[in-house]
Image: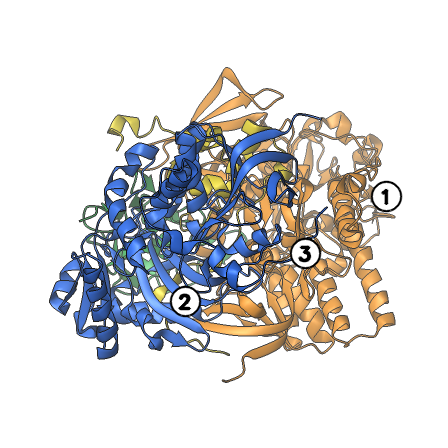
Chain colours: A blue, B yellow, C green, D orange
Amino acid sequence: MKNKKSYEVTIIGGGVCGCAIAYHLAKEGVKVALVEKGDICSAASGANLGFSVLSYRQNPITLKMAQDQLLVLRELSQELEIDIEYAESGGLIPITNQEELQVLSSMVDRCHEWGFKEIKIVNPQRANQQEPALDREKIIAAVYCPLEGILNPINLTIGFANAAKRNGADIYANSSVIGFEITNKRIKEIILPAEKIKTNLVISAAGAWTRELINMVGVDLPIYYERGEAMISSPVSRIIKGAVTDGILFTEASSIKSMIVGACLAQSASGGIILAQSTTEGEDYNIQNSPFGLSLVARRVLSFFPALKNLNIIRMWSGLVSFSEDKQPVFGFLDNPTNMFVVTGFHSTIGIASAIGNMVKEVYFREGSSYDVSAYSPLRFIKKSSALVKGDN
Amino acid sequence: MPKDNEKNSIKKIICRCEEITEEEIREAIREGYTTIKSIKRRTRAGMGLCQGRTCSTLIRDIIAEMTGDKKEDILPDSVRPPLYPVELSVLGKKVNKE
Amino acid sequence: MKRIKEHPILGKEEKRKKIKIVVNGKNIYAYKGETIAAALIANGYRDFRYTHRFNLPRGFFCGIGQCTDCSMIVNGVPNIRTCVTRVEEGMIIETQYGYGDKDGKNERS
Amino acid sequence: MERMREVELLVIGAGPAGLGAAIEASRYGVKVLLVDDKDKPGGQLFKQIHKFFGSKEHLAGTRGFDIGLHLLKEADSQGVEISLQTKVLGTMDKDVISLLVKEREMKLLKAKRIVLATGGIEKALSFPGWNLPGVMSAGAAQTLINIERVLPGERILMVGSGNVGLIISYQLLQAGADVVGIVEAGSSITGYLVHAGKVMRAGVPIYTSHTIKEARGGKSVEEVVITALDRRWNPIKGIEKTFSADTVCISVGLNPNGQLASLAGCEFKFFPELGGFLPLHDDNMESTKKGIYIAGDLSGIEEANSALDEGRLAGISVAASLGYIDSNRFAKLKEDYWDRLNKLRGGPFGHKRSIAKKKILLSSQQKEMRYQEIDCIELEENTKLKNYKSIPSLKEFQEFPGYPSLSRIKKGAVACIECIQEIPCDPCVAACPFKAININPYITDLPYLDENKCKGCGVCIASCPGQAIFVLNYNYSSEKAAISFPYEYLPYPKIGGKAVGVNRKGEPVAEVKIVKVDKRANFDKTAVITIACDKKYINQIRSIERIKDDA
């Protein structure tokens, strides 16, 4: 039998987080393996709008991360040697009624409080300058942030993966983790379909599959996933400038039966318009499309953007997005096994993936993190719920 | 954009919709993207209006040639709705539950 | 090219209503019920659009609405697949450049 | 919330397989909704203007579009609900099916059973210049000429010598185009030689071991370059030909159209003999997804007759599964259909498909059986006939049981059957009023001519879908022999006029005189032309050069 491969760090999950972590570690000379059950970028990282979000970050830390990322994103195409198609083309949240205005005004205030000033409530005319295809009659105001924008999430993820590889990382694609060999509270080996690999540290970046993966080491975390649906049109001339997020999504009114529906859209560099979102509770990793969801999205989009009526929709899909019980990120070590690090639950991860990768690197080298992420330790859940009892063998 | 005289001494197109050339496909395979699905993500081949209906068998042939994989092991890309392009306005109409 | 007036198996061309369509500003005649692509080919048109990336001509290819090749601007709407769209009286058909805007570009503004 | 419509059986695709399924299921009482994306039902049948092979049950000898009309009538009399211009966008969550009707309306419905009869998709072939206008799929060209009645071009190169390539080349000639050649990468013609014979007699060269290297032109195709290939299909440097051509048709085979089956969750496997990846199915035509049945080209690329019978089989299976047919009756019916299907897959052409079909059934029934084991099913030799790469020599023709002896030829008018491959087809047997032609015991056996019974009446000529029967009359006059052959081009030659007699490869042999042009109605638009020529050409001349213009 051939010698088992051995790594300092093994990252599980080939989405944007996993690939960014692999890149940041490999660049510093860490011997890294990246294990992915499908292809690189085959789940949520390839299935989203590619927004670089600032306005609706869930806490001051992720907002600061996103702000700091702006400089990084501008240089990232060059660094990764792939066009991530980043455009700081502005983000708009159309507002149609007083309820939305109230919620979003306080969101803007919150941003200002957290020290982010380049965001404001604008009138319909100004909103229309940002998105000329927007029907200004339909809105009473909008949230506008010039520093927001869009990028190509697939190119970003593949760019991190390729750059990691160039820096010596090994990528195990189409390799599901079957189990772990654990001794003395430490993972020693990861069992893959074709082989076992030795590792000193395991980083879970498994998105919606996080809970299932961590169950394998005897720990249960309250991490759930929801199914977000989206669709894309065949390419058209530029008609949508930046990122558009429906104001209704910030209110209760976006809920239709068990589904959250709103009009979010962006036009990719290659001309296709991506439209989302209808979100339902995730179940059995089902990624079929629902019968109605995207029809409701289409109706909502057309109410703002009637000029899009002739778009040819050529593909629908859905992605599973993970979130924790308290909707805050999960970032930190488990206590048993001690060498497993969990990363998940960052909202709108695409825009801050590089920062997440960099933070993992800082933790790895014990440099002290650029951001105070102590509140995001997974142990906050373990203290409350008891860890699964795992028999020693 | 190619000069006029280059137009027809051409690169061989594989994905007609997105105008992806054979050389671009081969480059992606050399980078390690050896499935139809991952080549699509890497190059955009198969992302256009026909959703790979024309080019996926051509890409399978190139993968098989370069990697030595058997064609039966090179799986098609996953299929998603709609199987025909549908206009946004039609999609957005009130759905008739016949 | 040309229409098949008489055919050994299908017989004489049945009488169909002639209608006028406008192709790149020029009036041509088509038959009611036929596809735009058929009418254009019968009138000698073959390059229906020029591509976005390499600016190369494309025409009728799959014939079943599954490829993008025969897309043109019809009554001002770009990306209409002419092999599955039937002619109508007075239809205005234009060669499509790129995705169908004036200069065929898709630049970010 | 209003209830979503639920149909008993939804059949998707109104080609022969879908119509077959809808008709049979409906016959036994199932409520059927048949949907198709086109504005006419019939699938590819209405593009098919040639006479079909097969047996009497398959209406052999009838033109494809007439078979289509016949099936539509049957569907109508069985009360099948047909919804046209209805595209299935996909299966969604909770087995809901999403439909797009007339491009303007979306509908959602559920179905207790589904038959997928979504047919095949033409394979692509890429070469420099294949993106130029003028390069098109052969099926697209066929739609233009036979449905739209517009010529795609005037000088056409066909790529691929399978039956589709050969038949469409022939139809392009009938429509009035020139076919400058047919290229075939393999070392032999892949379609039936009788189809090749039709185009070769019309002077179309077939270049085996050749492929298209490039199509050139400014705004559309102006010329094409073909190149010879070595045994490993690599181009041989320096052996190239350049033609002036305005159109290239690609006909390099079909893949099963498995999009919807894949979306619905059917399990697929790769069967190159049947066109590639296709859904597994059992002997009831049910896929691995319960309640979803498949038929026709989706379950393996074959031809219209097997598609129809597979469809009918799927239809009765659905009826049985819903309790409309009792199990004994069903077993009997099922056996009959398998019998018919096995016959259609008999002979050397069906052999590989027949083996592949067995593998499909085994893999779906015995999941634990490893594919390799299934792969070991013996490929027994089932033909003694030589595999001809192209049209054989006269000497070889004379050895076939349909070719009359020299002594019989000298006695006077006699049929000459140049049917040399084991094809499932037998209309000539029924056509002969004197019972001089026999095919048995299998429908794929070669026709045998009882030359003493044959009176040389020539009724069989137009009955043969392969256009492979001729009548030779050695004693037409003291100096001249007469040869009768089928002819389906316009304009017809004029009686008393002169023409150039050509041999089986379309090469001119001698000037001949037209003595008869027989266009009787029951020949169904196949004219039978009789020419008079020098007696020595009796075994050579088989047609005349097409007449280019009415002038």
Real-space Cα separation, disc 3 to disc 2, in angstroms: 41 Å
Out of A22 and A235, give the one closest to the viewer: A22
Residue D159 at x, y percent in the picture: 52, 35
Out of D14 and B95, give the one closest to the viewer: B95
Residue C94 at x, y percent in the picture: 25, 52
Q: What residue type is labelled 2?
A: Ser
In the rendered structure, the answer to whether residue D425 lies left or right of residue B13 reads right
In the rendered structure, the answer to whether residue D104 lies left or right of residue A94 reads right
Q: Residue at x 28, y 54 (%)?
A: A63
**Residue at the far bottom in the pictured view:** D2
Q: Is residue D280 above or below residue D530?
A: below
Residue tagged 2: A278
Please tell me how crowded label 3 is: few (under 14), some (14-19), or many (20+) other residues with Cα within 10 Å.
Answer: many
Residue tagged 3: D307
Secondary structure under the numbered disc 1 in the rendered image: loop
Residue A235 at x, y percent in the picture: 32, 51
- The answer to whether dots 2 and 1 both sit on one chain is no
Please tell me how crowded label 1 is: few (under 14), some (14-19), or many (20+) other residues with Cα within 10 Å.
Answer: some
Real-space Cα separation, disc 3 to disc 1, in angstroms: 34 Å
In the rendered structure, the answer to whether residue D284 lies left or right of residue D170 reads right
Pointer 3 and pointer 1: residues touching (CB < 8 Å)? no
Which chain is home to disc 3? D
Out of D87 and A111, give the one closest to the viewer: A111
- The answer to whether dots 3 and 1 both sit on one chain is yes
Q: Which amino acid does label 1 sit on?
A: Asp
Q: What residue type is labelled 3?
A: Ala
Which label number is shown at residue D450?
Answer: 1
